[in-house]
Image: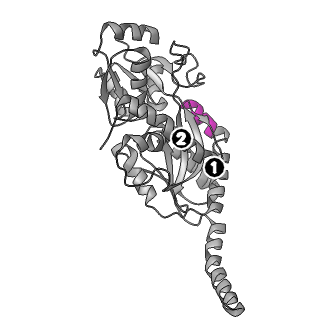
Amino acid sequence: MNQKSIRVTLASMLALAAPVAAAQADYPVKTIRIVHGFTPGGISDVLARSLGAKLAASFGQQVVVDARSGAGTTIASEHVAKSPGDGYTLFLQDITTHAINASLYRRLPYASVRDFTPVTLIAATPLMLVMHPSLPVKSVKELIALAKTRPNEIAYGSSGNGTIVHLAGEMLKVMAGIQLVHVPYKGSPQAVIGILSGEAAILFSTMPPALPMVAAGKLRALGITTAQRTSAAPGVPTMKEAGLRDFELVLYSGILAPRGIPRPVVDRLNAEFGKAVRLPDVQKIYENVGAVAVTNTPEAFAAHIQSEIAKLGKLVQLAGARVD
């Protein structure tokens, strides 16, 4: 190729790149959607709406929350994976959508790692072990003792097969050496209703639906699954304090985008979410649902997803959970 041809080729490449660079510099110029795969009122919905409002104010563009629950979050995951990588479709994922589903499903219509671009973690939240007050126990140790005298008689609820709530119940069974009956529901709010109605006796619930029921005395809290107690319920011991030394599960939430999103847009989103989670009124919302703000770089978030896939894959195998 002669020098003239090289100059023409370079000029053409620059001409094509200019509109793309301009679009990235102007981002965002239209409505942004934050998709999640959970029912309204849960932790993901609360986080999406509180952070979306802050991004809208910062960007000067509308940010809408698009809840696409069903099929263990795979409906929402597939939708995001197949959306344009332009920064206008984001995914508020959690430990279920990637770390669990990568092992739970034999086949997925997307690649859990390849088809997404990590932006940042945004929160870490415990699960809370709650029970119907009619159960004659007041601690985890008493629950375990009772379960050992009544194998396969005490039912535990979950937000669905293979969810972190389900796996927490399986972890309790294994670590305590007890036999429980699994009753799956279609989400954490529905599972809490199931406990209130007496269909199941215990539940590792996400925090938003459990906290008001505990405060009202309709449910009793026995423990939380993080290493430290939560300010939302400081009187509730950790599962480690309650006697299960190695019991720890953290419900992580983060922001992903479809594959191919330009790095300048990723960096802008990373910075904006980092600012939003630390605003005082957002911190108050986090505190109310028992969440802790956690942010990191896209690279660190990518490494975190890989490590969680490996760790939770072992727990899925332990539970024998599988979806075809």
- Residue ID at (56%, 30%): 288
Horizontal side, residue 257 vs residue 68: left or right: right
Instruction: Name the one closer to the observer, 259 or 88.
Output: 259
Residue 320 image position (x, y, % from top left): 34, 31
Q: What amino acid does circle 1 point to?
A: Glu
Please indicate, yes or no, whether residue 106 appears anywhere in the rendered image. yes
Residue 68 image position (x, y, % from top left): 39, 49
For the residues labelled 1 and 2, the Cα–Cα distance comes to 16 Å
Stretch in magenta: 282-291
Q: Which of marks 1 and 2 is in front?
A: 1
Element type at mark 2:
strand
**Quadrant hosting residue 145:** top left
**Quadrant hosting residue 210:** top left
- Residue ID at (66%, 80%): 14
Q: Is residue 109 magenta?
A: no
Image quarter hosting the N terminus: bottom right
* Residue receiving disc 1: 299
Element type at mark 1:
helix
Horizontal side, residue 323 vs residue 231: left or right: left
Most common SS among magenta residues: helix
Instruction: Name the one closer to the observer, 150 or 65.
Output: 150
**Crowdedness near tag 1: few (<14), some (14–19) or many (≥20) residues, C-alpha within 10 Å:** few
- In this rendering, is residue 273 above or below 157? below
Please indicate, yes or no, whether residue 273 appears anywhere in the rendered image. no
Q: What amino acid does circle 2 point to?
A: Ser
* Residue receiving disc 2: 253
